Amino acid sequence: MDTIRWEEGKLKIIDQTKLPTEEIILDIENIEDCRRAIKNLQVRGAPAIGDAAAFGMVLGLKEIQAENFEDFYEAFLENKRFLSSSRPTAVNLFWALDRMEDVVLKNAEMTLPEIRCLLEKEAMNIAEEDAATCRKIGENGAALLRDGMSILTHCNAGRLATARYGTALAPVYVAEEQGKRIHVYADETRPLLQGARLTAYELKEAGVDVTVITDSMAAYVMKNMRVDFVIVGCDRVAANGDTANKIGTYGVALLAKAHGIPFYVAGPFSTIDMDTPTGREILIEERPPEEITHGFGKRTVPVGVEVLNPAFDVTDHALITGFITEKGIICPPYKEGFEAALRGMKRG
Ligand code: MRU
């Protein structure tokens, strides 16, 4: 089953909070449930959040009773604000919602039923393009990988985090299709264990050789085992290449540098935010302390002790060897590289 599916006006997602022990498909029928699913990480990963939000806007249309364009647009913007407030860091959320708004604005002269149809079509396009883009990322990244190589990854940037294939894991899937055997070290990724629960789950399902390590083992593994590349995903890339990704990514990048291991970020252009000049301007989501104090139901921190729970950190662009994108591998200087690729995308 795909991570996300649109079927007869309903959004179907795999509930990622239940993996790997239970495979539950959730039917999401209204915008409130869609926002809740994004906020609670039932659907997660930057591209999948964007896909889900686009379908959330379509679900929200059911509650819009407007009879003229002005009233319709006002209610639409209210829904957009509602979904925008689900998670702050992954820029794909805002990118997808802006694409949906563009459809409304560019078709203001059409009838409201026509606009509703175009919005549903746009949400489906966003998800289909996500799958096609990830496939390209996979093809471009697979060129780096040779038979027998090992990579280390952090969090889950695989098929569960996108419409299909993933970003950081897409090169592994394509390399395997090409007959290369690739081994993956998956950091377990505290506190919510996206690496242990999700990356290991989907790689195992796909028959890829995967070893889960605790986050604190990454240095040991880099020093004593074979790690040819680190490949991670991204939630928001600033114009200069500074990259927000799951908390712990920055530490992995520092370790990779210390061990002379190339550190790649894989992601689509929808995650590159040219309006954010550097990583300093990226808003980092703070999540509830219970995710740390009550890891999976058991209290692990004494009552009354303060905890910190930023969901993401920013890796300085100087630590990044290159970006694996749908437009090829982009090397420093990143701002110029991103701008050139974006110019090519507009022309193409
Ligand atoms: O909090 P999450 O699980 O949504 O965080 C996800 C990540 O950090 C991923 O690495 C990122 O979104 C890229 S997904 C292709």
Image (spheres, rainbow, N blue to C red):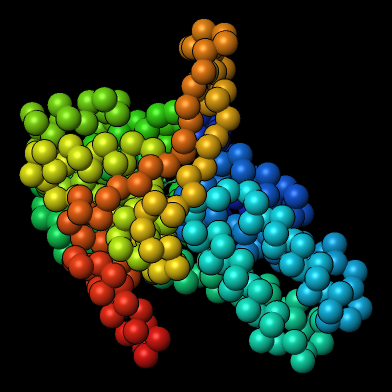
Tell me if residue 159 comes above or below residue 202 in the rendering.
below
Q: Nearer the viewer, residue 112 or 315?
A: 315
Decide if residue 277 is on the left or right side of residue 114: left
**Hey, which quadrant is residue 237 in on the image?**
bottom left
Residue at point 15% right, 26% down? 220
Quadrant where the C terminus lies? bottom left
Residue at point 61% right, 39% down? 40
Residue at point 66% right, 86% down? 106
Q: Nearer the viewer, residue 194 or 75?
A: 75
**Hey, which quadrant is residue 223 in on the image?**
top left
Decide if residue 210 is on the left or right side of residue 6: left
Decide if residue 185 is on the left or right side of residue 248: left
Residue 201 in view of the camera: no
Residue 192, x across and y down, in percent: 46, 31
Residue 211, x across and y down, in percent: 25, 32
Q: Nearer the viewer, residue 342 or 268?
A: 342
**Hey, which quadrant is residue 115 in on the image?**
bottom right
Residue 167, x across and y down, in percent: 35, 57
Decide if residue 50 is on the left or right side of residue 345: right
Residue at point 26% right, 62% down? 323
Residue 318 in view of the camera: yes
Residue 330, x across and y down, in percent: 23, 68
How many numbered marks are there?
Answer: 0
Q: Residue furthest top?
A: 302
